[in-house]
Image (tube, rainbow, N blue to C red):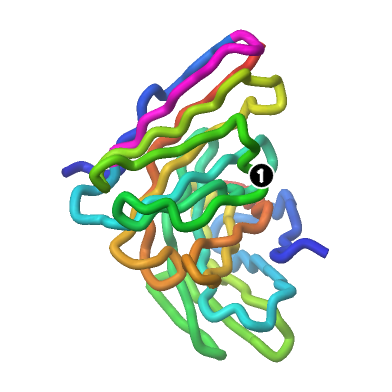
Amino acid sequence: QKEVEQNSGPLSVPEGAIASLNCTYSDRGSQSFFWYRQYSGKSPELIMFIYSNGDKEDGRFTAQLNKASQYVSLLIRDSQPSDSATYLCALGGGATNKLIFGTGTLLAVQP
Amino acid sequence: DTGVSQDPRHKITKRGQNVTFRCDPISEHNRLYWYRQTLGQGPEFLTYFQNEAQLEKSRLLSDRFSAERPKGSFSTLEIQRTEQGDSAMYLCASSLQGMGNTEAFFGQGTRLTVV
């Protein structure tokens, strides 16, 4: 079992809809959870991170964490074509606090 | 300082040749990470520096790979005797604290193609 599991997609949503991206993880000791966005051919950019169970909102983005069920999700409200990208879920931890990334979910927002 | 800089952006090399990549982190960041990303996959951790000390290496980093960060500033990643399986995007990231505690900033990457 991979440490971080994501559906590779593509996830296709119409413009203005809510996009829901999900991630499950295997290490119950994980403490921090990150969502990065990566446009094709570009480097990853941080969207947001979450440490505690529950929801964390930042503009159109909401991260949700459920440690008991070992999943973290990202909701994108009012999706725009410019949101079309690969969304990477990552876990922080270990002695050097590196990030372990999932394979990413490709989101396509249709105009 | 405009961010993490990587050089070169693209490298095509013949199998068996050695290649070296450079990463210049954000100047005040003492943490530096190297990742490798292949098509359709997420970034895979290779190695980590805190200042000039290399504190962790992935088992993915075979003995053909070596990384340095002299004086705790820029870092180099060398691959000796390249193989076709080394073809990937090599990403460098830097941060003020560990990546699991704060935002890490990635460079644009070096795309390596081994022919």
Q: Which residues are magenta?
A: B14-24
Q: Image quadrant of residue B86?
A: top right
Q: Residue at x 66, y 58 (%)?
A: A102
Front residue of B63 and B15: B63
Residue that mark 1 sits on = B60
- The vertical placement of A7 against B66, above or below, is below
Is residue B100 or residue B30 the one in the foreground? B30
Q: Residue furthest right?
A: A1
The quadrant holding residue A58 is bottom left
* Residue B7, position as x, y percentages in the image: 36, 26
| Image quarter of the N terminus of chain A | bottom right
- Residue A109 seen in the current view: no
> Is residue A56 something that shows in the picture?
yes
Residue at image coords 40%, 72%? B101
The residue under the point 29% across, 40% down is: B70
Q: Chain of mark 1?
A: B
Examine the structure image and report whether residue B19 is included in the region drawn in magenta.
yes
**Image: B59 above or below A77:** above
Can you say whether B22 is above or below B96 in the image? Answer: above
What is the count of numbered marks? 1
For the point 26% across and 56% down, which residue is it?
B29
Residue A12 in picture, x, y percent from top left: 69, 53
Residue type marked 1: Leu
- Give the camera-side residue of A71 and B97: B97
Q: How busy is the neighbourhood of tag 1: few (under 14 within 10 Å), some, or many (20 plus)?
A: few
